[in-house]
Image: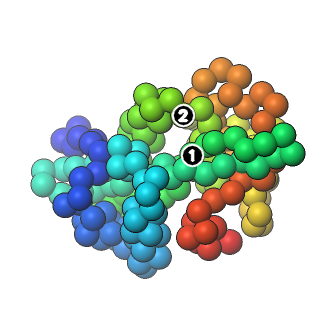
Amino acid sequence: MDSYFIRPEIPADRQHIFDVHIQAFGEDEEGRLVDTLRAERNFNMALSLVAVHGDRIIGHILFPPITIESRNGTVPALALAVLAVDPMFQCLGIGSALIEEGLEACRRFGHRIIIVVGHPKYYPQFGFVSARRRGIDVTFSCPDDALMALPLVPGALDGVNGMVRYHPALSLVME
């Protein structure tokens, strides 16, 4: 499908983004999560992207800030945490396009590491690797191969290990 474009979220998108999450997940938990993260002072609207078809938002991706806490200090990172595509537009490459555009935006803003808990056969195509093999873990239970990290610049994961700390609202959804 080529009749859509991707852009950063604008304030008028809030309800439409909420609706896309309800359509994609069949509930409002992810939409409420996005609203909670949006209210944070460190929310970067440029890292909340929407896919637009005509005048309709058909997809959304968000990269909220997180940290990786280790004995040697705190490493800033981002989570790829919440990706939604309207079911009528799924399997058309929109999710992949949102991820690719989002990763480029993260690079432009100078971010170095992205963490995702997701499908182990999907995210490696974007360069994600096992986080646990690198010594990075989360406070909740998830399969080893579902926890992945992406270095946005060469060497970004070198020497990085420890526990990922999510925003409390995101932790509640993940647990």
Quadrant for the N terminus in the image: top left
Q: Amino acid at mark 2?
A: His
Residue that carries the numbered disc 1 in the rendered image: 78
User: Is the C terminus in the top left, top right, bottom left or bottom right quadrant?
Assistant: bottom right
Identity of the residue drawn at 33% across and 69% down: 18
Query: Which quarter of the picture shows residue 32?
Result: bottom left
Mark 1 is surrounded, within 10 Å at the Cα level, by few (under 14), some (14 to 19) or many (20 or more) other residues, namely many
Residue 137 in view (yes/no): yes
Residue 16, how many percent across, how many down? 25, 65
Percent x, y of residue 81: 53, 55
* Image vertical order of residue 149 relative to residue 9, above or below: above
- Report the residue marked by disc 2: 111
Residue at coordinates 28% horizontally, 51% vertically from top-left?
Answer: 9
Ranked by sequence position, the earlier of labels 2 and 1 is 1
Where residue 167 sits: x, y (%)?
A: 59, 62
Question: Element type at marker 2?
Answer: loop
CA gap between label 2 and label 1 equals 8 Å
Q: Nearer the viewer, residue 150 or 161?
A: 161
Task: Examine the rendering and report whether any part of residue 161 can be seen.
Answer: no
The residue drawn where x is 47% and y is 36% is: 106
